[in-house]
Image (cartoon, rainbow, N blue to C red):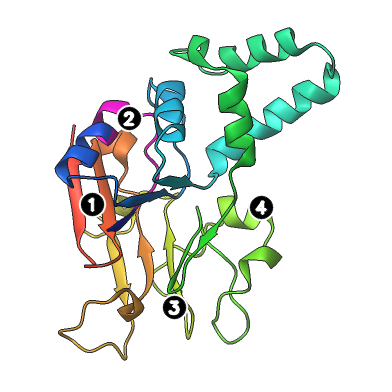
């Protein structure tokens, strides 16, 4: 099975519980749509755990991008003082920054800003659409568009004739009338009522506001089910 999650925000224990709940195995794949770090207390611990998962794939969110821009700025100021740069980067994470090492930094820097599959596309915040409502090729989008987009989440933004887009960035509770912390899956108008294939959906909003309400959810591409754990 292939699962997609977003905006874990340093909730290490909750993430481990989610893996146990879905009975995540060596034959499964889990894709994280960014914002692994910040807000919680286990940013580096979670980064290192996911980095060492052979069947995990990740992209950068706006929080990783902000960290990288800070890192790149330090390197421009002190290109030869690696001990100083590492110390400053460790201080970036006040709770568990002492765990940060160069292997983890290099791994974050190596992460892409999108992941594309046969029938789906994973970004952090959104992706621009062309004049016909189709997503533009992700390689033509800027990093800023992929990690900061605030429009793609709007319910009236409908993706046409394109792959299903997974994204997070904004808690879904801000959009739902009952304020629920749950994944929002937008079905295509032409999809058959009793059909549940990933091609039946045009976008899936994953950010369950984990750092606010303590709910972490993921979506399974093969069976189109959502799974949740709560702190």
SS for dot 3? loop
Q: Spatial distance from mark 3 to mark 2, Cα to Cα?
A: 31 Å
Nearer mark to the viewer, of 1 and 2: 2
Q: Position of residue 49 (x, y in %)?
A: 39, 28
> Which residue shows up at 65% across the image and 52% down it?
144
Nearer mark to the viewer, of 3 and 2: 2
Q: Residues within 10 Å of mark 1 (few under 14, many from 20)?
A: few
Residue 25 in which image quadrant:
top left
Q: Residues within 10 Å of mark 3 (few under 14, many from 20)?
A: some
Q: Are marks 3 and 2 in contact (CB under 8 Å)?
A: no
In the picture of the structure, the residue carrying the numbered disc 2 is: 11
Chain-order first, disc 1 or disc 4: 4
Q: Residues within 10 Å of mark 2 (few under 14, many from 20)?
A: many
- What's the magenta region? 4-15
In the picture of the structure, the residue carrying the numbered disc 4 is: 143
Q: Position of residue 104 (x, y in %)?
A: 56, 26
Chain-order first, disc 3 or disc 2: 2
Q: Is residue 176 above or below residue 92?
A: below
In the picture of the structure, the residue carrying the numbered disc 1 is: 179
């Amino acid at each position: 099975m292939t699962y997609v999650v977003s905006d874990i925000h340093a909730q290490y224990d909750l993430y481990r519980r989610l893996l146990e709940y879905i009975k995540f195995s060596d034959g499964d794949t889990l894709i994280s749509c960014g914002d692994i770090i910040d807000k919680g207390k286990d940013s580096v611990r979670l980064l290192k755990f996911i980095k060492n998962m052979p069947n995990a794939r990740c992209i950068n969110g706006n929080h990783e991008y902000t960290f990288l821009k800070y890192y790149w700025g330090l390197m421009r100021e002190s290109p030869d003082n690696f001990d100083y740069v590492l110390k400053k980067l460790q201080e970036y994470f006040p709770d568990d920054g002492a765990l940060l090492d160069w292997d983890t930094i290099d791994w974050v820097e190596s992460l892409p800003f999108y992941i594309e599959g046969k029938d789906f596309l994973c970004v952090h915040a959104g992706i621009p659409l062309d004049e016909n409502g189709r997503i533009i090729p992700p390689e033509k989008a800027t990093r800023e568009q992929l990690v900061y987009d605030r429009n793609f989440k709007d319910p009236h933004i409908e993706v046409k004739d394109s792959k299903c887009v997974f994204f997070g960035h904004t808690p879904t509770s801000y959009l739902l009338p009952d304020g629920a912390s749950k994944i929002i899956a937008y079905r295509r108008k032409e999809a058959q009522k009793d059909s549940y294939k990933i091609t039946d959906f045009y976008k899936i909003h994953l950010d369950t506001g984990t750092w606010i309400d303590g709910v972490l959810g993921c979506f399974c591409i093969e069976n189109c089910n959502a799974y949740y754990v709560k702190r």
